[in-house]
Amino acid sequence: MSGIVRVYKRDDEGVLHFREAWFDEEYSQFVMNFGVVGHQSKTEETDVADAAAADALLDAFAVQCAEDGYAEIPDEEQFWVVAQFALKTKEGTERDRYLEEKAKDALVSHLAWRGLGTVDRSEFTDFKLNIFCLCPDANKAANAIKVCARGEDLDFTKLTIAAAPFKEPENFKVKHSAKSATTFSL
């Protein structure tokens, strides 16, 4: 088993928790990240001899998570949350391509360390940069994206955030708009 194991569980009060683990090849460490979805996680690293040892730990981690009631959330039970930045040109400039990379990098990290999902892709459309995130909790993800955009100086005044159920990508609802817009289009 290689890659990342990412699983979730609701506690008795309905609070969503997450656990994830992966092998960091650069540091030869098995990394576990866990906590309440939407909050900064806790991380534990364990030095490992090689990838085979990390795979054994990853397998054991997956088994323990399953025994504890954690499971993957299928894509179709998650939400598309789109961070959309208004642009000055139809297809974007070099500055906008820099914004795209900076925003994607910032969102990957910010969402991951809070169990809020992954950045799936980005695209330039007419006068817009859209960054698509696949998230288990749309409202918490939208709030985290706002915090991230402010903290990373990502043109917050040009940001609109909308969310839709995975199975209904045509039904985006605005979660935040710097321009007080109530409609959203990709």
Image: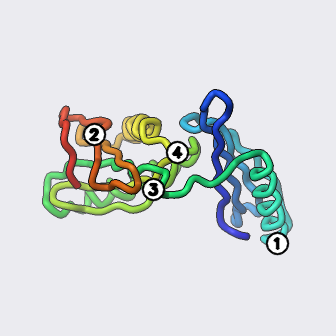
Say which label, 3 or 2, has the lower sequence index.
3
Image coords of residue 53 (percent x, y): 84, 67
Q: Residues within 10 Å of mark 3 (few under 14, many from 20)?
A: many
Total marks shown come to 4
Residue closest to the eye, 5 or 124: 5
- Indicate whether 146 appears above or below 130: above
Point out the frontmost of discs 1 and 2: 2
Q: Amino acid at mark 3?
A: Val
Identify the disc placed on residue 174. Answer: 2
Q: Which residue is mark 1?
A: 52
Colour scheme in use: rainbow
Between the C-alphas of marks 1 and 4, the distance is: 29 Å
- Among the two numbered marks 1 and 3 on one chain, the one whose residue lies closer to the N terminus: 1
Question: In the picture, which quadrant includes the N terminus?
Answer: bottom right
Alpha carbon distance from label 1 to label 3: 28 Å
Expressed as whole percent of the image width and height from the top left, the position of residue 39 reads 57, 34
For the residues labelled 1 and 2, the Cα–Cα distance comes to 45 Å
Residue at screen point 38% across, 40% down: 149
- Tell me where residue 104 sits by quadrant: bottom left
Numbered badge on residue 116: 4
- Tell me the mark number nearer the camera, choosing from 3 and 2: 2
Q: CA distance from mark 3 to mark 4?
A: 10 Å
How far is disc 4 from disc 2 in space, using C-alphas? 18 Å
What's the residue type where badge 4 is placed? Leu
In the figure, is residue 60 to the left or right of 146? Answer: right
